[in-house]
Amino acid sequence: MGLLSHLTHPKGKIWIALDKATFQEGEAVVGKVNVTAEEYIPSIGLKVEARVVESWNEMVWVTLPNNQRVQENQRRTNNLYSRDVQVTGPTDFGKGPTQTFPFSVGIPPCRPTRGGASIQNLLKAVLQVKGRPDMTNETQIAFVPAGAYGSMPMNVGYGPGPMPAGYGPNPGYQPNPGYGMPPMNPGYQGYGQPGYGVPPPQQQTPSVKVRCKYCTGLMDANASNCPTCGAHQ
């Protein structure tokens, strides 16, 4: 290889495939790192880097070339969490089919430390190559609050939910108003029907959920601030 081979990126592709699109807070992030080589690549090792990055805009004073000082809006970042997980040791890759390596890494829930900041949960796959630049690929992890995937509890007789056997409307049953009781007068409300001793049940409008454009957490569609990261929408 030439004298500048140490500056040449290896010919190949690396990418992360997560087991699912969204994870609960506190749940291990599980997925696979895929590597496709288009040439011989001697690897020192394959690792996954987990990062939680906080970012915000801040007004700072800067000096222009004419020595004039002005305020400028700059983007600032701060690492709240950092962890590297070694997936494989030294491995040689040759031209051929894609090789897949499973991984699992824990990322703790982090909240912004200042107003107006947003949180990004990042995962980077790094194939360390001997004597040449590394092959990398980065993706963002979407988390939802713990318990967001919980199943709906059984609701007996009130609102949506399964109904026990033996209850509910029977399409084959036709009551006879003349059997055992006088004929019903116009406007009569039978027992258990709306208007008999109790007001009719009120139907609640379901709450519409959307995702925060900063942390992708779930929030009410009419909310002005995200309950997870506090960012203004």
Image (tube, helix red, strand yellow):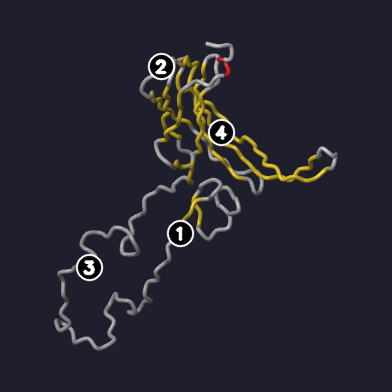
Earlier-in-chain disc, 1 versus 4: 4
Q: Quadrant of residue 54?
A: top right
**Residue marked by disc 3:** 169
Residue 188 percent across, percent down from the top left: 27, 85
- Local SS, label 3: loop
Residue at 45% over, 35% down: 29
User: Do the CB atoms of the residues marked 1 and 3 lie less than 8 Å apart?
Assistant: no
The amino acid on which the numbered mark 2 sits, given as a three-letter code, is Gly
**Residue marked by disc 1:** 208
Q: Residue furthest right?
A: 67
Earlier-in-chain disc, 4 versus 2: 4
Return the residue nearer the eye: 53 or 183. 53
Looking at the rendered image, the quarter that the C terminus falls into is: bottom right
- Local SS, label 2: loop
- Which of discs 4 and 2 lies nearer the camera? The answer is 2
Residue 144 percent across, percent down from the top left: 48, 45
**Residue marked by disc 4:** 51
Residue 200, disc: none
Q: Is residue 197 left or right of residue 210?
A: left
User: Do the CB atoms of the residues marked 2 and 3 lie less than 8 Å apart?
Assistant: no
**Residue marked by disc 2:** 94
- Which of discs 2 and 1 lies nearer the camera? The answer is 2
Label 1, label 4: how far apart the Cα atoms are = 31 Å
Residue 93 percent across, percent down from the top left: 42, 17
Q: Is residue 79 left or right of residue 125?
A: right
Residue at 47% over, 14% down: 42
Residue at 48% over, 16% down: 43
